[in-house]
Each structure stands twice: as structure tokens, then as C-alpha cells.
Image (cartoon, rainbow, N blue to C red):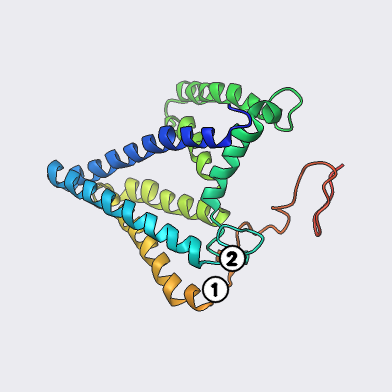
Amino acid sequence: ILPGKPIANLLFKIYGRISTIHALSFLSDLKLGHYMKIPPRCMYTAQLVGTVVAGIVNLGVAWWMLDDIDNICDVEGNHPDSPWTCPKYRVTFDASVIWGLIGPRRLFGPGGMYRNLVWLFLIGAFLPVPVWALSKIFPEKKWIPLINIPVISYGFAGMPPATPTNIASWLITGTIFNYFVFKYHKRWWQKYNYVLSAALDAGTAFMGVLLFFALQNEGHNLKWWGTEVDHCPLATCPTAPGISVDGCPVFK
């Protein structure tokens, strides 16, 4: 958008998009409090205090990590199973390079390497039409109207920083609780599903801290199939023609 100005593009993304995402998350928490019969004023106060405390703690922890953890966010300098490769923030960096430093015209414009991706805008605009048509042709099929193309497409946004293990976990958990539990135990779903979602998030964060101090801080790494990033040794190989990397095929 602003070729040659990655910092300007990054600031626009942070203050525009990220603030909107946090506002939506804030409203989601208020909705959870509403379901739990928590007074809105108490909920808002807890969120405000939590935001202030989290902002201070996060900044302090970030400074500590940058000073004390060797090769943090360095993919080549860390073990493949290292938790300090910063995939989410590398996606933000890559976005600033694509949309700011290089510019989208070179990548997605005429002659660009990814020019065919632009056709997905047109495809996405027409994808809901077949679903709508099938729901009219087969009204007895109650599952067809449940296919929501915008929701499915939005799910792709979380894939760049994620791994197949993350995506499989989301898919299995969502299918179990939002289909089977919702279908066969709806009263339980209505009463506990939102609370369970918050508990899973809190449990993941707690276990991350526990594993760091119990294992990773002592230099111990768990090696098993669940920690494999993508289960494909060629996934990180370059696809641009003529680039040679050890252990990777060369495209011509």
C-alpha cells in the first residue's frame, strides 16, 4: 500500500486493525459475563483493571525475554521445536514487508509471482451462491444452510502463524462441542460451553507457564509427534524457480 515504508504500514495495522480486534474481544468477554449473570459494571471494572495490569506485565516480560533468551524469534538459530520462534510476530513482519517494503503491486500485480491469488476475491464473492441454491433445491437437508462461507474463509486467517497440530485441535474440539454436544446435550451446551471455552484458554496459558519453568527453563525439550510443526520436511523449502537449498528440490 505504501511501497518502501514498512513502518508506516505496520503502524496503520497496529492502531487500526489490532485495536478493532481487541474491542471485539472486549465485547466477547462482556457477553460471557452477561451469560454468567455478572453485573456489567463489575465486569467492565475487572476488564479495565486487567487491561492495565496486563499492559504493564506484558511490556516487562517482553523486555526480559529480549534480554535473557538467546536467539529469540530467530528460526535458524533455534531448535525446530523451540517455543521461541515467534510465528505470530513473524507473520506481522512478513505482512509489513509485503504491503509496505515491497508493495502489493510487485507480488499481486501483472507479472507478480502471486498474481493468480487476486482471482480469489471473485471466487469468494460467488461461493455463497451454490450454497444458497442447494438450500432451495434440497430444503429437507437441514445441514446445507449451516454452511457459512464467510466464517469458513475467516478461519483461514488464523492459518499462517498456526501449525497443523493447532488446526487439528480447533477442528476436533469445535466438532465435538459445537456439533455433537450441541445436538445431543443442548442444555449442557447452553450452560457450560462459553465457560468451557474460557477454561480451555486459561488452561493453555497456565500449562505454557508451567512447562516453561518445569522443563524448557532447565533445557529439557519434549520430542514427540505432537510437537512436529508440519510433519513435512519439505514444507519450508522455497518454491521460487532457481533457488537452491540443501535438502530441497530446485524448481525450474
- Mark number for residue 222? 1
Q: Is residue 65 visible?
A: yes
- In the image, taking residue 2 as reference, residue 137 lies left or right, namely left
- In the image, taking residue 228 as reference, residue 37 lies left or right, namely left
Q: Quadrant of the C terminus?
A: top right
Q: Give x and y (percent) for residue 234.
A: 73, 55
- Mark number for residue 133? none
To which residue does mark 2 refer? 81
Q: Are marks 1 and 2 in contact (CB under 8 Å)?
A: yes
Q: Give x and y (percent) for residue 175.
A: 43, 49
Give the secondary structure at mark 2.
loop
- In the image, taking residue 128 as reference, residue 26 lies left or right, namely left
Is 199 in front, or is 115?
115
Q: Quadrant of residue 78?
A: bottom right
Q: Give x and y (percent) for residue 35.
A: 20, 44
Q: At label 1, which amino acid type do we have? A: Leu
Q: Is residue 41 above or below residue 244?
A: above
Q: Counting residues from the N terminus, which is met first, the one under dot 1 or under dot 2?
A: 2
Tell me the residue at 27%/44% (across/down): 29
Tell me the residue at 59%/65% (across/down): 81
